[in-house]
Image (tube, rainbow, N blue to C red):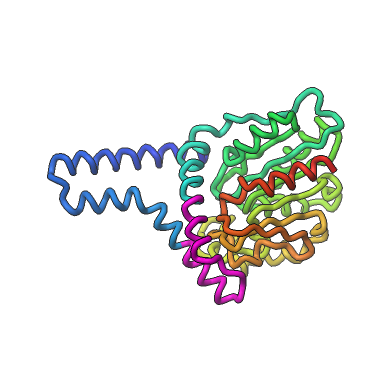
Amino acid sequence: MLARSLRVLLAAWCAAVVAAIVAGVQDGWPAWVVLVLLLLVGLHPLLLGVEFLIGRAVARRAGAPVCPPRAALRAWAAEWLLATRSFAWRMPWRTHAQPDHLPANAAGRRGVVLVHGFVCNRAVWNPALARLRALDRPVVAVDLVPVFGEIEAYAPIVETAVARVEAATGRAPVVLAHSMGGLAVRAWLAGEPARAARVHRVITVATPHRGAWLASLGLTANARQMRMDSQWHTSLVGAAPHAARFTCWWSACDQVVFPPPVALMPGAESRPLEGVAHLSLIEQPEIWDDLLRRLDE
């Protein structure tokens, strides 16, 4: 579903760029054509920059850690490149380029469940899937659908993935979740108390465990649930008996989940990273090393 929508948007964007260039060549590049091209090319990095500025202002007002200007600039550039690669290539065209890996010899070896975040699909994990496959590690990556559904509706998807890894390995998996994916895992855990014994560790990356300021601008069902003052989120925060099983990775330069303390679940292990933006966090070697260490415990 998301892949198809992204393809349509990319086709419309390309058509608009070509039309603007043709108009510029024919009409001698009037100001309106130049402006349209600048908007088409520069709107994405501009919006990213606005998110960084808002994040810094909100963090400062909340007395939370603030991303230094130079670190924010580097994080902005890295996030722009990765987001472009992810939303223009991986997610629309490479959704199943890296399949799940449940080898015949998986019994007895701990596996991984990968859970993506808001308005993403399993392709954001393609580099991780390729690495785990090269290491012959059992791994399953989910697709959370519907894209704009309620978060608790994703619990059966998480259940199916965990059950598949359990059946192949005979062991409780490590769950690695990005952004909203961490809340989907928590919603799954909240469904039945016994489920906590079925995960060895939950590693969340940039998950709005206490809500996120930016979600106040969202109108979809899952965005409304992620608001800091939402009833759904408040009830979830109050039901975290398994926090000791969680490791929470976060960054003061996260331009989506801010102010920074909201990415930390009370009672969980806190692992901050410096100078890394929201999507870029999932490709950091420190998180990869943490995952491998948990698999070998």
Identified at 83% across, 44% down, the residue is: 198
- Looking at the image, the residue that sits furthest to the left is 27
Quadrant location of the C terminus?
A: top right
The magenta segment: 51-78
The answer to whether residue 81 is left or right of residue 115 is left
Identified at 68% across, 49% down, the residue is: 286
Residue 211 is one of the magenta-drawn residues: no
Q: Return the x and y of residue 21 as percentages of the image width and height.
A: 23, 41
Residue 70 is one of the magenta-drawn residues: yes
What secondary structure is the stretch in magenta mostly built from? helix
Q: Quadrant of residue 167?
A: top right
The answer to whether residue 83 is left or right of residue 25 is right
Q: How many marks?
A: 0
Q: Is residue 54 above or below residue 186?
A: below
Q: Is residue 53 above or below residue 125?
A: below
Q: Is residue 89 above or below residue 197?
A: above
Pick the front one: 142 or 35: 35
Q: Return the x and y of residue 148 as percentages of the image width and height.
A: 55, 50
The answer to whether residue 280 is left or right of residue 269 is left
Identified at 61% across, 69% down, the residue is: 65
Pick the front one: 282 or 119: 282
- Looking at the image, the residue that sits furthest to the top is 104
Q: Return the x and y of residue 259 as percentages of the image width and height.
A: 59, 67
Identified at 13% across, 45% down, the residue is: 28
Pick the front one: 116 or 125: 125
